[in-house]
Image: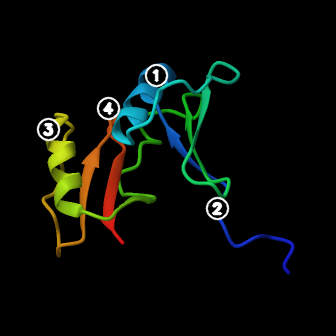
């Protein structure tokens, strides 16, 4: 077994307001927004049972740090239902469903995110 494991422990996302970002991402993912803010600028949201986290960080935020291209994607089993859900939430959609498998949206800070059917 290697010294470096073949899984990501965290995905960092630059956000301008840590509390608002926590609430927004938790709502997007259908989770309770009860995760603590750490050191005034971090919030770790667990993504799976393997220890992967979405780390929202207001300390690294700047307009230049915002994702202009998706750095990762959230999975879905039903791309059409996911698209409708995002649309119903009034979230800014950037694309329609492309090739029957993915679409892009923006978070409130303008980070480009992707939802992808696995």
Please tell me how crowded label 4 is: few (under 14), some (14-19), or many (20+) other residues with Cα within 10 Å.
some
Please tell me how crowded label 3 is: few (under 14), some (14-19), or many (20+) other residues with Cα within 10 Å.
few
Task: Return the disc, 1 or 3, that comes first in the chain's sequence.
Answer: 1
Q: Indicate which label's residue lies in the foreground, 2 or 1.
A: 2
What residue is disc 4 on? 108
Q: Indicate which label's residue lies in the foreground, 3 or 4.
A: 3
Give the CA separation, mark 4 to mark 2. 25 Å
Task: Return the disc, 4 or 1, that comes first in the chain's sequence.
Answer: 1
Task: Return the disc, 3 or 4, that comes first in the chain's sequence.
Answer: 3
Q: Indicate which label's residue lies in the foreground, 4 or 2.
A: 2
Residue 79 x %, y %: 23, 62
- Residue at 42% across / 22% down in the picture? 20
Residue 8 is tagged as 2
- Residue at 70% across / 21% down in the picture? 39
What residue is disc 1 on? 17
Residue 67 x %, y %: 41, 49
Give the CA separation, mark 2 to mark 3. 31 Å
What residue is disc 3 on? 88
Task: Return the disc, 2 or 3, that comes first in the chain's sequence.
Answer: 2
Give the CA separation, mark 4 to mark 1. 10 Å
Give the CA separation, mark 1 to mark 3. 23 Å
Identify the secondary structure beneath mark 1: loop
Callouts 3 and 4 close, C-beta under 8 Å: no
Task: Return the disc, 4 or 2, that comes first in the chain's sequence.
Answer: 2
């Amino acid at each position: 077994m290697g010294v470096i494991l073949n899984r990501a422990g965290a995905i960092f996302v630059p956000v301008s307001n840590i509390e608002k970002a926590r609430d927004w991402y938790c709502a997007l993912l259908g989770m309770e927004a009860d995760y603590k803010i750490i050191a005034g600028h971090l919030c770790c949201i667990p993504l799976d049972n393997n220890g992967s986290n979405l780390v929202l960080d207001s300390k690294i935020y700047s307009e230049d740090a915002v994702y202009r291209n998706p750095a990762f994607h959230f999975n879905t089993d039903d791309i059409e239902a996911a698209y409708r859900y995002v649309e119903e939430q009034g979230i800014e959609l950037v694309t329609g469903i492309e090739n029957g498998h993915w679409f892009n949206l923006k978070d409130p800070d303008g980070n480009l995110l992707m939802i992808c059917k696995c």
